[in-house]
Amino acid sequence: MQVSELVPRARAGDRGAFQRLYEDHVGRVYALCLRLTGDPEDAMERTQDTFVRAWRKLDTFRGEAAFSTWLHRLAVNVVLAEHRSSGRRERRTDLAAAEAGPRVQPAPRAGLAVDLERAIAALPPGARAVFVLYDVEGYRHEEIAEMAGIAAGTSKAQLHRARRLLREALS
């Protein structure tokens, strides 16, 4: 069954149709959440939060973009909202740790992809989010700024910082 058939059925309360949408999209949503959070447990929680929110907000999906695009944006918003609400004290701790530099240990050269994923996970949260949204997911700085509640210039600075830290971690 096509997404174009599943969404209206799920919107009408068909849990089986929504289950199918979940099964079709959970892998990509989890991968995005993992890249944004850097933590498998947190990513799983944010993935579940995304699908709970999707079920509740399915009536707001207008079909102007692909369902996967809508769901993807919803996942980004869930992760960023959780990051914002985690509290000032935690963010101050993250900033202090970030100033000390990345905590990436040189890994054996089993594969650059594995090394890159580890290095991304070790980035400070703000830099990691901007890097993933810009370089991996293809959002523009203006879109990232709107989603994250920061200035476009801050997004650009965080991307520069993330790339520098990744270069250092991978060299």
Image (cartoon, rainbow, N blue to C red):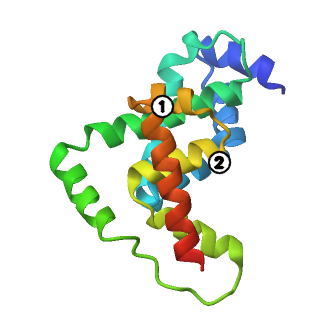
Tell me which residue sits at (56%, 59%) in the image.
Answer: 163
Q: Name the residue nearer the viewer: 97 or 39.
A: 97
Give the SS element for disc 2. Answer: helix
Residue 89 in the image, given as x and y percentages of width and height = 15, 50
Counting labels gives 2
137 displayed left or right of 88: right
Disc 1 residue type (three-letter): Ala
Disc 2 residue type (three-letter): Asp
Q: CA distance from mark 2 to mark 1?
A: 15 Å
69 displayed left or right of 129: right
Disc 1 target residue: 152
Residue 128 in the image, given as x and y percentages of width and height = 48, 53
Query: Does residue 162 sit above or below 65 in this rendering?
Result: below
Query: Does residue 6 sit above or below 103 in this rendering?
Result: above
Give the SS element for disc 1. Answer: helix
Residue 112 in the image, given as x and y percentages of width and height = 70, 76
Tell me which residue sits at (25%, 44%) in the image.
Answer: 86
